[in-house]
């Protein structure tokens, strides 16, 4: 979307402002070491024994592969950008799992996201909030 520059700062949005929300999400919400499928029976163990950790679990539709995580995070970032005024676009997202395993998605996540039965807004990766699962979310 074209936006006029102001003749002063000459930025649509200062980069420092643009990345604050995303960095807060990545740094405070994501468990970088553990992700789990929504179908995994281990979720019941967490519900019974460590319910305080449920809101920190990244819960994915199917196996939490690097490819899927990259698509889900790309969709989440797009939701943040739209909610923040829809002035910026992400053109690619790189997710490095190990020094030898990196996924790069370009031109949006839609082609890589799984087909889901409900409307996109029903899933955490399409909402501009800090949710990382749909556990306990009633819609």
Image: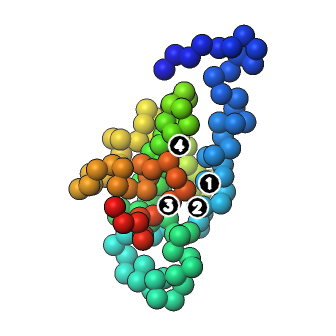
Residue farthest toward the bottom in the current orientation of the protein: 49
Tell me which colouring the rendered structure shows. rainbow
* Residue 57 vs residue 79, the one in the foreground: 79
* Residue 13 vs residue 97, the one in the foreground: 13
Are the residues flagged by discs 3 and 2 in contact, CB closer than 8 Å?
yes
- Marking on residue 132: 3
Quick one: SS at disc 3? loop
Residue at the spot of label 4: 80
Residue at the spot of label 2: 30
Lower position in the chain sequence, tag 1 or tag 3: 1
Lower position in the chain sequence, tag 4 or tag 1: 1
Quick one: SS at disc 2? loop
Residue under the point 65% across and 60% down: 28
Residue under the point 69% across and 36% down: 17
Residue farthest toward the right in the current orientation of the protein: 8
Are the residues flagged by discs 3 and 4 in contact, CB closer than 8 Å?
no
Percent x, y for residue 55?
53, 70
Residues at marks 3 and 4, CA–CA distance in whole angstroms? 13 Å
Lower position in the chain sequence, tag 2 or tag 4: 2
Q: Quadrant of the C terminus?
A: bottom left
Dot 2 surroundings within 10 Å: few (below 14), some, or many (20 or more)?
some
Residues at marks 2 and 4, CA–CA distance in whole angstroms? 15 Å
- Marking on residue 26: 1
Percent x, y for residue 12?
63, 22
Quick one: SS at disc 1? helix
Residue 137 occupies which quadrant of the picture?
bottom left
Q: Does residue 67 appear left or right of residue 27 in this picture?
A: left
């Amino acid at each position: 979307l074209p936006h006029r520059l102001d003749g002063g700062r000459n930025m649509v949005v200062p980069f420092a402002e643009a990345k604050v929300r995303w960095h807060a999400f990545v740094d405070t919400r994501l468990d970088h070491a553990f992700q789990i499928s929504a179908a995994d029976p281990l979720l019941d163990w967490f519900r019974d024994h460590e319910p305080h950790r449920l809101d920190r679990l990244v819960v994915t539709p199917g196996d939490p592969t690097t490819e899927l995580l990259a698509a889900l995070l790309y969709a989440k970032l797009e939701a943040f950008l739209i909610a923040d005024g829809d002035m910026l676009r992400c053109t690619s997202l790189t997710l490095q799992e190990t020094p030898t395993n990196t996924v790069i998605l370009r031109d949006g996540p839609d082609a890589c996201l799984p087909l889901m039965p409900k409307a996109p807004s029903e899933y955490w990766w399409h909402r501009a909030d800090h949710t990382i699962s749909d556990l306990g979310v009633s819609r």
